[in-house]
Image: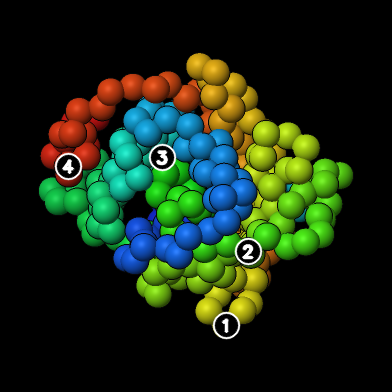
Amino acid sequence: MFERALRWSLAGVILAAGIAAAQTPAPAPADVQARLKAVDDARNAFGEAKIAARATQVDNGKATGSANFDIYVKGRDRVLIVFRGGKNEGRKALTVGEKMWLIVPGAEHPVPVTANQRLMGGASFGDVARLRFAEDFTAVLRPETETVDGRACAVLDLTAVSPRAPYPHVRLWIDAAEERLPRKLLFFLPSGKEAREVRFTKFRKIQGKLAVSEMEIRDLLGPNASVLTRLEYLEIQPAKIDDKVFTPDGARAM
């Protein structure tokens, strides 16, 4: 079952809310904007980097499978994921803007896919690079703090600027005591139903910047709400990446 879910249940690696904003957001109060920018900086510490990552599917506290991959990121709209080891060795997922392709070893042509297709569990391709809170959402800060995993957090209600965003409303919890780190996200469908939860569980400093190093993603819809995907960034290396990597032919050569 794990291999079937991994084999193109595409949820592994980019939150589908990462569609680029089509409009300019209304100005947010300076403090709220600063909070959103701090969260963006923790999630996307480097605009160009190579990341060694592992996704582990966990069902009721028990790991049921995992996959390792490298992620090449350049800006907010170019991402290449290269699977390492196991039955998916050599498979690649390339995202450029709003276009995405699956590249399978031995196949003559890349296969167009959508950002909502799944790699594993509850993570989707937008988790890696595309979502920018300070650019893609307007925000309202709630007057009271709430507790997440024992930590007092400020709570922001976000509204997507783009009418095309699959999750028009998001709730964001930010640690009130530590460098404005994100602690939790809750994504809502247009109907108002809770769809996806993300918890940021680990951080580490890289070249003086504090970056997310582990998160847990859970789909709240359907029969698999007990299953979460733990996404670990094992190594983050700032790097200069050739533009050719982000073409189907260049990706195939990686």
Q: Which mark is residue 3?
A: none
The residue mark sitting in front, 2 or 1, is 2
The residue mark sitting in front, 2 or 3, is 2
Disc with the residue nearer the chain's start (1 vs 3): 3
Mark 3 — residue?
87
Mark 1 — residue?
191
Disc with the residue nearer the chain's start (2 vs 1): 2
How packed mark 1 is, by other alpha carbons closer than 10 Å (few <14, some 14-19, many 20 or more), is few
Mark 4 — residue?
247
Q: CA distance from mark 2 to mark 1?
A: 20 Å
**Is 34 placed left or right of 75 in the picture?**
right
Which residue is pictured at 54% across the width and 24% down the height? 209
Disc with the residue nearer the chain's start (4 vs 3): 3
Disc with the residue nearer the chain's start (2 vs 3): 3
Which residue is pictured at 65% across the width and 44% down the height? 182
Residues 162 and 55: in front is 162
The C terminus: image quadrant: top left
Which residue is pictured at 42% across the width and 21% down the height? 237
Mark 2 — residue?
140
